[in-house]
Image (spheres, helix red, strand yellow):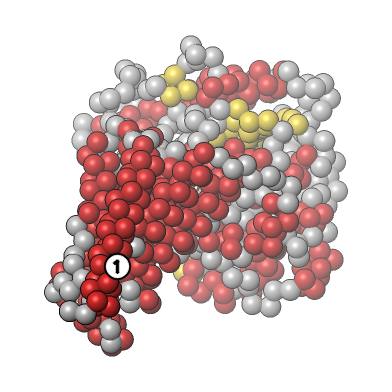
Amino acid sequence: MGKHELKNKKDEGKWNWALLAANVLLTLCFAAVFWPILHKGSLSFLDKTSNLLALAAFLPLVLRPWKKAPAPLALLHDLLLLGSASAVSVVVVEYMVKGGSVGLEQSFWQGWLCYIGLYAAAYLITARGRHAVCVGMGISLLHGLIDHYVMLFRGTPVMLSDVFSIGTAANVAQGYSAPVELSVLRGVSTAVLYCVLVCLMQRRWKLFDRWYVRRGCSLIVVALAAYAVHYGLGITGTSINFWASSRSYSEFYYFLRCAGRSIVRAPEGYSADGLQTLAEDYKGEQGTKTPNIIVIMNESFSDLGIVGNFETNEDYMPFVHSMQKGQKNTITGNLLVSTFGGGTANTEFEFLSGDTMAFLPFGCSPYQMYVKSEMPSLVGALEAQNYQTVAMHPYLSTSWNRPQVYQSFGFDEQCYEDSFPSDVERVRGRVSDSASYKKIIELYENKPKGQPFFLFDVTMQNHGGYEREGYPAFEEKIRLTGEYEGRYQQVDTYLSLVRCSDEAVQELISYFANVSEDTAIIFFGDHQPNVPSAFYDELYGNTDAERSREQKQTKLITPFFIWANYDIGSQTGVEISANYLSAFALDALGCSTSGFDELRLAAQQSVPRINSYGYYLADGSWHDNETLSECEALTAYRSAQYAQIFDPKKRIPQWYLP
């Protein structure tokens, strides 16, 4: 061996030792910043999850194949590397955005699997493990940083729909300063150190020198990763409960699950000129009244008798039934909603905004996905008339992103469970309707004298489940008799809760019947209850699979009434859907209406009821939502709704006000 070759070998040996020392030192630095993050938030008590994520992260960093390793071993290491980078991403992003506190343990694994999909896609494009890790880590880190500051400024995570309003976001961001926080520095440091460690790996397998070999091998790795993701999500589940806070889920998983339901395109023919024409054609009406308006959206309040006949020991809603027979200054009827057994906020959204879920992606949650900044609504319309506006929900404020939505709608005040005294009356552990209505009376009595009062109350008493086990003792006044007697305990409990609601709203009306100020109460249920499906099957006489979509509509009907302590025209048997109800009520009560209200009332004449599944024409015929684009009577309504939710630049704000 010549002197030159010997010198090169010695230099290479020194380089290898230096590289080894650098790898060891950087690995220790990575462990020093990553290990504490693995024990923050939920991971501090989820030992199994924390340890498994640590194992996934460190394994390919420690077990590195040699330069001339066999192809199967090299591919296995690449696959482990994708899983490792995914573990680092999910831990780092969750730590930066919400301190690692995730409501559901499975959410860490859902996020991990989604990140594997991201890294697999990067690997498919680059065909190199190191490049894929750097690309994937860059994307996940960027998403985490954006989500961190969006959550900090807005309180809600970033959505795909935000991408389409990036110009507006940039303008709004100018008013904020982005503090550099320790969690951000630690998260970024962890990600950068990990990428440096991966880049220092000596991965020069001759097998992969030819591009077509690399591409073929990358397909094998991606196929294995795709199988792991598919199988893993089958175990962890892919559903999202939108009533829960986004903090229950990992950020990337939540983003991806919402993305498919968030894109709404402008209607055909939509334009600024078209909106101006609508503003000229529909101007609204000047009213003669500014009554106090109290809206009760009662949790799960419904009349199951509309689905089918059954017997009970006594009437489960005698007061509401008596109103439906015809009472002075009262309008009663059936309300078509878009949700069953849950999804409260969607009925709430339809009433307050005047928009219909029919024009939005099926299964979406507007409160979580679309309402992120100031938006025209019933609240703003009443505030323009000097109303004091209050939102009430006698439960936690975290459900359905309400604090941010109510702020966007313009409520002056928000009241949640912590606004009630600790010894407040409860039914099965929840604040009772009666206690909620007493709070309404208290707020009314303390309002500025002479100022009209608007309150929107989302009750909680009747929320499922309806099993006796696990709840405080509750006196069940109502029970099924006849052929169903003793067979459906949950139905007995539910009907007894309805009876409590019926009694409470009677007390509320009795109070306001005696006040001197003009006052109206609008009452409706948000959806029917999720009681045993077997009970519904017996009422229908068939199974859910055997029913047509039109037949299923009876499970999407709740009762409503509008009552006033002054003269209004009485009506019974009104058939309407939730999106029209606020405009209908304002008109019936003699209040001022906006151009948007007038447009909806005009649409109601041709399409009196509409929801996520379909719509009814004035002749009573049912049409599936697949034919929605063919209904010319809804064209203007669709454009107005799109502008209201998605296009603040083109919409005409004053048109949505009286």
Neighbour class for label 1 at 10 Å: few (<14), some, many (≥20)?
A: few
Is 118 left, or right, of 356 in this rendering? left
Is residue 469 visible in the rendered image? The answer is yes
- Name which residue type carries label 1: Asp
Quarter occupied by residue 323: top right
Rendered view: 346 above or below 486: below
Between 638 and 604, the one lying in front of the other is: 638
Between 173 and 209, the one lying in front of the other is: 209
Q: Secondary structure at mark 1?
A: helix
Is 39 left, or right, of 455 in this rendering? left
Quarter occupied by residue 596: bottom right
| x and y, in percent, of residue 298 in the image | 51, 35
| x and y, in percent, of residue 56 in the image | 25, 52
Quarter occupied by residue 469: top left
Between 170 and 188, the one lying in front of the other is: 188
- Split into 4 quadrants, where in the image is the N terminus? bottom left
Between 419 and 256, the one lying in front of the other is: 256
Rendered view: 124 above or below 112: below
Rendered view: 421 above or below 385: above
Reading the image, the residue beneath label 1 is 11
The residue positioned 16% from the left and 72% from the top of the image is 69
The residue positioned 59% from the left and 37% from the top of the image is 403
The residue positioned 63% from the left and 31% from the top of the image is 414
Residue that sits furthest to the front in the current view: 3
| x and y, in percent, of residue 88 in the image | 35, 52
